[in-house]
Amino acid sequence: MSGEVVNVGIIGGGLMGREIAAALRRWPALIDHPADPRLVAVCDINPDAMEWFDTISTVRLKTTDYHELLADPEIDVVYVAVRHDLHEQLYIDTIRSGKALLAEKPFGIDRSAADAVMKAIAATPKSFVRVSSEMPFFPGAQWAVNYIQSGALGRIVEAKCAFLHSSDLDTQKPLNWKRQQKFCGEAGVMNDLGMHTWHVPLRLGWKPERVMGILQDIVTERPGPDGSPMPCDTWDNAVIHSWASHDGSPFPLTTETKRIDPGEKNTWEFEAIGMSGGVRYSTKNPKEVQVFAIIDVPGAGREQSWQRIDVGSQAVWPTVTGGNFESGFSDAILQMWAAFLAERAGKLGKGFGAARPEEAALTHRIFAAAKQSHESGCFTPPHE
């Protein structure tokens, strides 16, 4: 590797912390990247959670106190993956330590927490902060973004982005922090999955002007530590209908975040349809993008057509992977980190970057407006 060595620390050694560690081990798959990241430190309040990282030879610090990690002068970048109620203080402390931060969604448990982090960023001019959102880094998602930015849609008729799970279909699944407001936040599933559905629309400039939330708390109790039922008080599913504008023309924009969508596991879907064209992409078939066009059909004249196109493996940053191969979730994480560290180095150019703090902060206003509209039955503007 010829890039600048970047020492990385992880706070939160759970599922996503391990995924990030694995992605950094695959860094040589990237071609001529300006950074050479090395995982050197891990923090978790549970010592057992850090044992997995013993197999990574570059890790020299394991600690249960995140202050120790932030005090290490050799660490350049910190990735934080902890409960939502812990975001605010950890993010502020990381920013004030002078280290770059890749923060997990939802960037604070609520609007107040996100605003406090934004103030810390403003008070630290050299800070570099982005927010984790992997799904738009699938090659097909990038293909769809490029298609829209080309102007091929013409006037937009409608657009939709969804992130779908069936992880809570099992009503006997034990209660955990993501199913409790005091840890996850009043926005529930919108906090946990909403950044996935708003990253692309907001990056395209589709800021919602009015929203209508349709929220469901389907499973109201789950087994507690002793097996007896305990309140499960977060939203399981959320559909947000909104009005946005593109080139001055309004159009309906819908986002869906669902933990109970029978038949789904971890599906990200995006669709935008216009008067001149259309595009659809779903991670359910990661190699395929669908494109709409009016085409000349020999012997039949002009007809409407949805065409299926294979997009291959290449996304934001070029890799050694064969261009005709399929991509998966681990590839999307690698691409997100490639974009994050390239942008930190000033080398991303016009490439699609990780979610910005201001985009994450805006989602909290969207979620709050969706909750208010659900309660009132009226469209509600996100408040500045």
Image (spheres, rainbow, N blue to C red):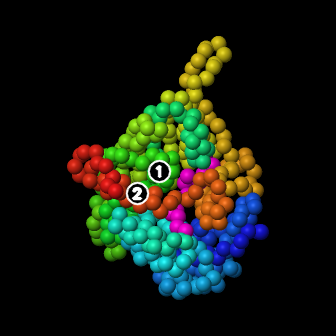
Q: Quadrant of residue 307?
A: top right
**Rendered residue at 57%/34% (across/down):** 152
- Do callouts 1 and 2 mark residues in contact (Cβ within 8 Å)? yes
Residue sticking out furthest to the top:
299
Residue 134: say if magenta. Answer: yes
**Rendered residue at 40%/66% (across/down):** 114
**Rendered residue at 55%/68% (across/down):** 128
- Which of 164 and 112 lies nearest the eye of the viewer? 112
Residue 259 on image: x %, y %: 41, 55
Q: Which residue is mark 2?
A: 362
Specify the segment rendered in magenta.
Answer: 128-140
Quadrant for the N terminus, please. Answer: bottom right
Q: Is residue 229 left or right of residue 37?
A: left
Relative to 204, say whether 109 is above or below: below
Quadrant for the C terminus, please. Answer: bottom left
In the image, which disc is placed on residue 202?
A: 1
